[in-house]
Image: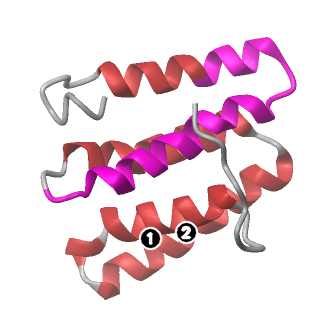
């Protein structure tokens, strides 16, 4: 498993939510994308502050799912996104919550196996 090293003051999860949302909404145009990205970032920040890691994983996986289905999304970006999502398991306070996050991740990665099979 990869190790997450903070290289900036921003929480890595929030940076990933922002970049994932920007990639996922890029084709919609700035008028549609900017408010959506801002909404997702605000929601993610609320989850982080409240320690709702299962909700955070669900939010991140929803955007990542769009990128997993996109033929133009770079594999390196997806690998980084999935690494940060998997790292959420280390932040939880209970085994049940960790198992819940692991199940969410597995469900996304095993859904539509034909899309980017080597990355999954």
Residues under numbered marks 1 and 2 in contact, where contact means CB atoms less than 8 Å apart? yes
Which residue lies most toward the bottom here? 31
Q: Nearer the viewer, residue 82 or 94?
A: 82
SS under mark 2: helix
Percent coordinates x, y for residue 31 in the rendering: 33, 87
Read off the magenta span: 72-101
Percent coordinates x, y for residue 21 in the rendering: 42, 64
Look at the picture and state if 28 lies above or below 63: below
How dense is the environment of label 2, judged by Cα within 10 Å: few (below 14), some, or many (20 and up)? Answer: some
Image quadrant of residue 29?
bottom left
Q: Which residue is mark 1?
A: 36
Q: Left or right: where does residue 2 sit relative to residue 53?
A: left
Residue at x 63% of width, y 18% of height: 100
Percent coordinates x, y for residue 27 in the rendering: 20, 73
Specify whether residue 49 is painted magenta: no
Q: Nearer the viewer, residue 42 or 87?
A: 87
Type of secondary structure dominating the magenta stretch: helix
Q: Left or right: where does residue 6 sit relative to residue 70?
A: right
The disc placed on residue 26 is none
Look at the picture and state if 7 lies above or below 29: above
Percent coordinates x, y for residue 7 in the rendering: 70, 69
Q: Which residue is mark 2?
A: 39
Specify whether residue 75 is painted magenta: yes
Q: Left or right: where does residue 51 sit relative to residue 74?
A: right
Residue at x 47% of width, y 50% of height: 80
Look at the picture and state if 60 lies above or below 109: below
SS under mark 1: helix
């Amino acid at each position: 498993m990869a190790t997450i090293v903070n290289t900036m003051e921003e929480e890595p999860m929030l940076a990933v939510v922002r970049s994932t949302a920007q990639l996922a909404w890029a084709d919609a145009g700035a008028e549609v994308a900017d408010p959506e990205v801002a909404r997702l970032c605000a929601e993610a920040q609320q989850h982080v502050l409240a320690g709702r890691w299962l909700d955070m994983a669900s939010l991140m996986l929803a955007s990542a799912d769009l990128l997993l289905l996109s033929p133009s999304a770079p594999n390196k970006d997806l690998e980084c996104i999935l690494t940060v999502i998997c790292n959420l398991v280390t932040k939880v306070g209970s085994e049940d919550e960790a198992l819940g996050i692991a199940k969410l991740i597995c469900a996304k990665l095993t859904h539509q196996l034909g899309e980017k099979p080597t990355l999954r």
